[in-house]
Amino acid sequence: MSGTASDPGGPLDAGGAVVVVGGSLAGLRAVQGLRRGGFTGPLVLVGAEAHLPYDRPPLSKQVLSGKWEPERTSLAGREALDELGVDARLGHRAISLDVGARRVELDDGSSLVGDGVVVATGATPRHLFADEGVVVLRTIDDSLALRDRVAAVGAGCRLVVIGAGFIGSEVASTCSALGCVVTVVEMLPVPLVPALGETIGGALGALHGRNGVDLRTSTSVESVTASSSVATVELGDGTSLEADVVVAGIGVVPEVSWLFGSELTIENGVVCDPSLFAADGIVAAGDLARWPFHGELVRVEHWQMAADMGDAAATGLLAGRAAAPAFEPVPYFWSDQYGEKIQVIGHPSPADEVVVVDGSLDERFIALYRHGDALSAVAALTKPRQLMGYRPLLAAGASFDEALAASEPR
Ligand SMILES: Cc1cc2nc3c(=O)[nH]c(=O)nc-3n(C[C@H](O)[C@H](O)[C@H](O)COP(=O)(O)OP(=O)(O)OC[C@H]3O[C@@H](n4cnc5c(N)ncnc54)[C@H](O)[C@@H]3O)c2cc1C
């Protein structure tokens, strides 16, 4: 696909051309949304990984545990992509974007020009002491490599996880069920505070101890030294841990390296307008997209958000920037740890007041977040049916009092 792109601000010509960069969840959803919306023109999907699109949540759960083989994570096989009429350029990395011309240059020297471009290159893990054999978990290859390393050591494998965020905690949970002796080292006094605040962060952090995993909070990692097959993890409190495997789950950064030097606004992600347009004819979706939501620029790194954004980016591109609807989702995410299901709907802030309306924090619970007079979010531990009852309230912008009234036993 080459040539000159036309009329960048208007609706997408059904027979134009679109380049989607990022061959995973958000990119695939954009492709599917474009076809569903009637787009019949050439569609190219560029993906740095050689794999067909696959799902990441099982990588720290069913794939790592060995319950699933990698094939089960498939989001779309070759046949499905053919049916969508997609020219999938997998194993190819985009290296630059000319915003005015909407031209994407690839690492093989070729370039693609679209009437529309979808930017969906996700995020990449922060590395820590990478040279000392500390591993991260983002891709299917990472997951299989970690699974093999743990299996090679066998039962009693000493695993140190750096960071008690969602990925680190899932790795701890999965590996402890495999028979590993797991220590989680967390710099914060209470895990997950930036995402969920102290009350819920504390309740979720307590899952580790209840399940035999040693969680060390307010503890930094000073260094990791690997000698033959064993690593020594030096902690900020002067103690050290011997480990067979060290995993870092210390967050991700948006994968925008190929966009530096383009005219897009890059500030902790690709900055978009309310309809996910980063420029005329260019939309962003998924873990790298930062857009105005509830009065602030927000970037969310969760599955449902990436999927919804891919759909919305397609809708917006088809409508054109002037007519595109604002993207106003009800955020949702989940995490599976120690046989429990953590779920959150809405947009919690760490300073929000939290009220438990069902169960208790040291067992299973439903907790409401109050932001001013409004219900901002609802968190649940293994109460999926009750949690979903609050979705309509969040979608309708219900007050906290309305949510409390709805929580009363009837
Ligand atoms: C182990 C793990 C477990 C998770 N579990 C949960 C969970 O339980 N619940 C939940 O809500 N969320 C979970 N998530 C988060 C969720 O998977 C992500 O939010 C989602 O994958 C984001 O989708 P994306 O398409 O934006 O980005 P990605 O999935 O990161 O996909 C981006 C793709 O773009 C490719 N790419 C990068 N740079 C380039 C380039 N220059 N050119 C071409 N291609 C490029 C990448 O290789 C990648 O394939 C988990 C994530 C991980 C890693």
Image (cartoon, rainbow, N blue to C red):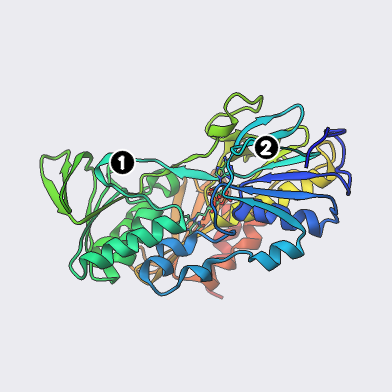
Image quadrant containing the N terminus: top right
- Tell me the residue that label 1 is attached to: 130
Number of residues whose C-alpha sits closer than 10 Å to that of mark 1, classed few (under 14), some (14–19) or many (20 or more): few
Q: Viewed as shown, does residue 101 lie left or right of 56?
A: right
The residue type indicated by label 2 comes to Ser
At horizontal 73% and vertical 58% (from top left) the residue drawn is 32
Outermost residue, front side: 109
Hey, which quadrant is residue 218 in on the image?
Answer: top left
Image quadrant containing the C terminus: bottom right
Q: Viewed as shown, does residue 237 lie left or right of 315?
A: left
Instruction: Work out whether mark 2 precedes mark 1 in sequence or the reverse, and give the earlier one.
Output: 2
Q: Ligand 1 near label 1 (Cβ, under 8 Å)?
A: no
Question: What is the count of numbered marks?
Answer: 2
Where is residue 41? Give x, y as percent: 84, 50
- The Cα atoms of the two marked residues, 2 and 1, are separated by 32 Å
Q: Nearer the viewer, residue 252 or 66?
A: 66
- Tell me the residue that label 2 is attached to: 110
Where is residue 145? Give x, y as percent: 35, 59
Q: Viewed as shown, does residue 55 lie left or right of 120?
A: left
At horizontal 52% and vertical 70% (from top left) the residue drawn is 71
173 to 114, vertically: above or below: below
The residue type indicated by label 1 comes to Ala
